[in-house]
Every structure is written in C-alpha cells, then in structure tokens.
Image: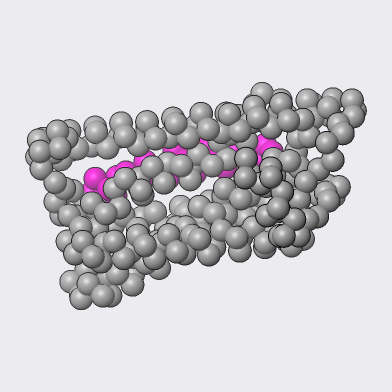
Amino acid sequence: MERSQNVTEAEAKAEKQLLRPHRKIAYALGNFFTVLAIAVWFPYNISFFQFVLGLSAKNAGNIVLIAQVGGAISTPLVGMWSDKCSCKIPGRRKIFHLIGLITLALVMFFLWYKCLGCSDASEVYQVIYFCCFAIIFQFSWASIQIGQLALLPEICVQKRTQVQLNSLRYSFTIIANLVVFGCFWLLLKFYSDDSSKNTGDKPLTPDDLNIFLIMSAVVIGLGFPSSLLFQFLIPEKVNVNLAKQTWYKWIVNPRFYL
C-alpha cells in the first residue's frame, strides 16, 4: 500500500502537531525490545545450546534453522493479517505490536533456560521444546517489527519525517547492541566463576546458565517498558486513505527494493 505523494500544508501542519519530539522517541523505541532480544539471540544461540545446555552442534544448528524457517513463514503472514485486521482498539497495526511484546516477554525465559521437565531427556525432546519457543520468538519479532513499520506511512506523510523516524529507530538498534554486549561482558567478568572466559580463552559451560537467565531479565526489564511507550504515545488513525496494491504490483515496483 502507498499514500499519495501530494502533501498539503494542512497535512504537514497536522503531522508536526502529532509527532512532537517525545512521540518521535516513543516511535523509535517501538522495536527496542526486539533488537535487544535479537542482539542476544543471533550471536549467542549456538553457544548457549551447545556449550551451556550440552546439545550437539547438529541439534543446536537445527534449532536455529527451524527458527529461521518459522520466521520466514510468520513474517508475511503477520503482514497479511495486519492488513486485513479491523481492530480499532488499539488499532490494526498496534494490536500486533502489543501481541508481539507480550509473547516475546513470555518466551524469553523459556528460550534461555534449560528444558523444563525434559532437561535429562533425550536431545530430540529438547530440540522440539526449544524449536517451539524459537518459532514463537520469531513470530513475536515479526509482529513487533511489522506493527511498527507498517504504521509509519499512516502517521506521517512527509518523506523527511519518515527518514527522521527511521534514523532514530536505527540509532536505538545500535544502542541495544551495545547494551547487550556490555551486559554480557560485565556478567562474564564479574558473575562467572571463571574470570578468563571474558577473554575468549575458554568456552561457556553449564555453570553459566544463570548468566543467560539474568540477561533475559535485563532484556525484558529494559525492552518491554521502553517499547510499551509506543502503545501509549503513538496514535493510530482508523480511517486512512491508502491505495491498495496487489502482491504482483509490489514485486514490479522498483521502490520495493530500495
């Protein structure tokens, strides 16, 4: 879907009144929870499953692979459901953003802790267990990202404002990665029994399970309330005049690939 390129003076003025500085920050924080969680997931998932939980390298890779497949399937589905959604409170975009926040907060502890009730069982059961939560994690990620990004052309019509909001959003992505890196460094240096691990001389061990549990609490404690500001401060217009496009028109549209 795309909006007409003609921006009237009245629309520009209304947009300026709507997107005050505190609301721009709230929009940029809309996916802060997601990028914190992703900053933990992608760099450390294989090491966690293999060295902390003791799974084989093959099964650790299978969990990550299935999670990525789940993300590839859930992302377009969430986009289609969001377009067809008629929810007015909090809005067809914000409802998926809210669902993503809640499910991500619930899944973080299960994803970064040992298999509850099956930690001593066969690896097959553990792989199934973590695959389920990894797929939910990917669905949560897609819901938050799509809920935030799809709302951008509906709350602002000026390209300059859209670029500004995306720039702020990316700035918090960088901050989130630095926060996760710094927290892991501090935990490995001061919380771990083996202080040499922070130098990379030794791999992680099962004794480091609590480090990932603490990191999950940090991600939820920082990310969830920050991204929740998006729900309270960013209004969603109910009846927005958008021109619908078929999937074929999107594919042949050069701007889709920019």
- Report if residue 173 is visible in the image: yes
213 w.r.t. 229: above or below: below
**Looking at the picture, how far across and down is residue 4, in whole percent?**
84, 40
Give me the residue at 22% from left, 72% from top. 123
Give me the residue at 53% from left, 32% from top. 170
Give me the residue at 28% from left, 57% from top. 113
Residue 218 magenta: yes
Q: Quadrant of residue 247?
A: bottom right
How many marks the image carries: the answer is 0
**Looking at the picture, how far across and down is residue 130, in whole percent?**
34, 65
Of 35 and 1, which appears nearest the observer?
Answer: 1
Give me the residue at 48% from left, 35% from top. 173
* Left/right of residue 45 with respect to residue 79 in the rendered view: left
Residue 191 magenta: no
Q: Quadrant of the C terminus?
A: top right
Q: Does the magenta stretch mainly form a helix, a strand or a loop?
A: helix
Q: Quadrant of residue 184?
A: top left
Stretch in magenta = 210-234
203 w.r.t. 15: above or below: below
Colouring of the image: one colour
- Report if residue 24 is visible in the image: no
* Left/right of residue 208 with respect to residue 40 in the rendered view: left
Q: Quadrant of residue 6?
A: top right
**Looking at the picture, how far across and down is residue 11, in whole percent?**
86, 31
